[in-house]
Image (spheres, coloured by chain):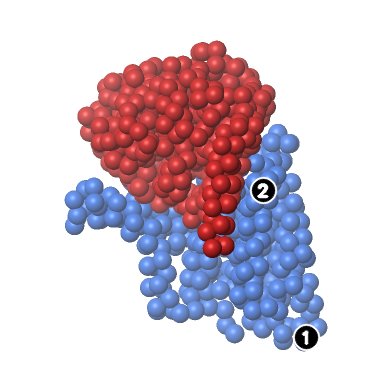
Amino acid sequence: MPHLNTSRRMLLAAGAAGLAAPALAQNAPIKVGLVAVLTGPQAALGTQLRDGWMLGMRQLNNQLGGRPVETIVIDDELRPDVAVTKVRAALERDRVDFVVGVVFSNILAAIMRPVTEANTFLISTNAGPSTFAGRGCNPFFFATSYNNDQVHSVMGQAAQDDGRRRVFLLTPNYQAGRDAMAGFKSRFRGEVVDEVYVPLTQLDFSAELARIASLRPDAVFTFMPGGLGVNLVRQYRQAGLANIPFLSTFTVDEATLPAQGEAALGFFSGTNWAPNMDNPANRAFVRDFEAAFNYVPASYAAQTFDAANLLNGAVRRVGGNLADKNALRAAIAAADFQSVRGAFRFGANQFPVQDFWLAQVARRPDGRFQTETVRRVLEANVDPWAGECRMPARI
Amino acid sequence: MLLVVQALNGLQFGILLFLVAAGLTLVFGVMDFINLAHGVQYMIGAYLGATLAAATGSFWGGLLLALPAALLVGLVLEWLVFRHLYARDHLSQVLATFGVILFLNQGVKFVFGAAPLQMPVPEALSGGVPIMEGLLYPTYRLAILAAGLATAALLWFLVERTKAGMLVRAGAANAPMLGALGVNVDRLFMLVFGFGAMLAGFAGVMAAPILSVEPGMGDNLLILAFVVIVIGGIGSVRGAFIAALLVGLVETIGRSAMPDLMRLFLDPSAARQAGAAMASMLVYVVMALILAVKPAGLFPVKR
C-alpha cells in the first residue's frame, strides 16, 4: 500500500498548494514573452517593436495592473522553427503569462498553436494574417495591429478616391506580396496597366523603372518591405519618376525613412497610425520614445506600446488574478486603455475596428522624416475576414 | 528604345558585379581559397563609405578614406583568419569564411544598428540624363559605369603588364613552383587578398548611394559573383569581366522580357508570376549551358 499512501499525500499537497497559489501569484511577477526579429536584415522592425514595449513598461513603472512584470525578450531570427523552439521554452520553462509581439506573419503562424494550446494569451502587435482574422480566429488571440488586407485595400480606396485610372503594380514574388496586390485590387476599380513581380533578393530596380516610364501610369502601387523599399524609393527618385505618385504599404515608414531620407519625400503610405496624430497619448508617446531611443517610432512601436497599456488595463480590471481565463479575456476585450490612435475597440474576431489613413512622408522642423496623415480613407473599418470567424463565447 | 535602356541597366549592374567578382576570382584562382566572406567585405566597404561620408560631410571624402580602410580590414582579416586556412581543404575554408559572414553581419548590426544607412549621391553627379520620355538615367549610374571600366582597364594593366601581375598569373598557374623559384608566396597572397578586399570595398562604396546599406547586403551579390567567376573561368580577370557583363545583361533583360515572353503561352496573371520565377532562374540556366559547352568557363586559366 505504500504506493497509495504516496499518491494520497501528493494529492493533499497539491490541494494545499492550490489554495495557496492565488495568494502567491499576486506577488510573483507577471511574465511576458516578447517575440521580435532582432537579428538579420529585418531586425530594424523588431527593434522598433521591442522598444515600443520597453517604453510602455518604463512608463508603467514596469508593472501591469499593479503587479511587477518580468519581460523575456525572444529573438525569433525570422525563422519559424527557431521561434517555435524558443516560445515553447518560454511557455514550459518560464511559464509566461502572455506572449506579445511578432513582426512577420509566418512567425505568428508558427507560434499560434503552441501558445494558444497552452491556454496562454497571444497579443500580436503587428502580424495580422487573414487566417487568424477569419476561420482560424482564436479566443486566446488578440491583435492590436490590423488585418494585413486592410492596409493594402486602404491604398486601393485612396487611389480610387483620387481618380487614378491607370495604376502600375510592383511587388516581391511571395505570398505577402501577392496578398498585397489582391488587397489593393479589392477596392480599386481602374485599370492595372501592368503587374510586376520581382525576386525577394532584388537589388536593382532599373529594369522595372524603365518599364514604368514607358507605360506612364497615373500612379504606382507597391509593397516593398525593408531594404527592398529603401532601394526602390531611392532609385525611383533618381530615375526622375517622382512626378508619378508613389502609393505604398510598409515601404516608406519610420523604420526605413532614415535610409530613404529626401528620396521618399511626398510618397504615400496606408496606415492606421502616424507619429503626427494629434491626441495627448500620442504626443506623449512620440516625445518620450524619441527621448529614450533617439529615433522616430513607426507603427510597430506604436502598436506594441498600445499592447502594454492594453494589458495594463486588463490586469487591473481582473485585480491581478490571471487564473480565470474567461474573466481575463473579457478584460482584454474591453480594451480599457488610451490608445495612441485615439479611440480603440476590438471586433468580434478580436482584431481592432479602426480608422485607416492615407499618409505622406514629410520632413519635420528638426530635419527628421516621418509619415503624416493626409486624410481618413476608411472609418471604423472591420476587416474583410471577420464574418468567417466563429468565436466561442467561452474558453 | 526600352531595350537600349535595359541593356544599359544590365551593363551597369554587370560592372558592379565585376568589381566584386574580380577580387573573388583572384583570391580563388591564385590562392585556391574559397572566400565566402568576400560579400561581407563589400558590405564593410559600403558601411565604411556611408559612415566616413557622414563624418567628412562629402561623398568624395568617404570614398577616399573608405578605400584604405577597406584594405586594412581585408589585411586584418587575412592575418587573423584566412592565412590559417590556406593549407586546409575547401570544406574548412567554406565553414570558416561562412562563420566570418555571420560574425561580421552581426558585428555591423552591433556597431551601426539594424536599420539601413544612407549615403548621399555626390552633388556633382546628382542629376540625370533624359534617356527616354519620362525617364532620367542617373548621372551617378553612368559614373559607376565609367569607374568600373576604368578599374577593369587598370586591373588588366596590373595583371598583364607589371611584374606583380606576372607573379599573380604565375601563382594562379602553379603556386608551389613559384615559391620554389624564390618568390615570397605568402606575401603575394596577402597583397592579392588585400587588393581583392579593397576592390570589393570600392564596389560597396560605389553601390551605397543607390542600394540600401544594411547587414547582409553582400550575401545576395556574393552568389551572383560566384556565378560570374565560374562562367568566366576561375582565376581569370578577363573572364570575370566578360561574364559579369553577361550576367548583368541576362539578369536585367531577362527580368523585363521573361514575363512578356510567358504571356505568349499563359494568361496574363500566371505569366507575370511564372515569368518572374523564370527570370530569376535564367542566370543559372545560362551558367549551366555555358559549363556544358566549356566546363572550365569561358577563359580558363591554363595549368
Residue nearest the observer in this picture, A169 or B152: A169
- In the picture of the structure, the residue carrying the numbered disc 1 is B181
Which label number is shown at residue B108? 2
Q: CA distance from mark 2 to mark 1?
A: 42 Å
Q: Residue at x 40, y 79 (%)?
A: B293
For the residue marked with disc 1, what is the amino acid?
Leu
Q: Residues within 10 Å of mark 1 (few under 14, many from 20)?
A: few
Question: Where in the figure is residue B125, as x and y percent of width and height?
Answer: 57, 38
**The N terminus of chain A: image quadrant:** bottom right
Q: Which chain appears red? A: A
Is there any visible trace of residue A161 in the rendered image? yes
* In the rendered image, the vertical position of residue A170 relative to residue B157, given as above or below: above
The lab-note entry on whether marks 2 and 1 share a chain reads: yes
Is there any visible trace of residue A79 in the rendered image? no
Q: Residues within 10 Å of mark 2 (few under 14, many from 20)?
A: some
Q: Which chain appears blue? A: B
**The C terminus of chain A: image quadrant:** top left
Question: Where in the figure is residue A233, as x and y percent of width and height?
Answer: 47, 36
Q: Number of marks in the image?
A: 2
For the residue marked with disc 2, what is the amino acid?
Val
Q: Residue at x 74, y 46 (%)?
A: B65
Chain at numbered mark 1: B
Chain at numbered mark 2: B
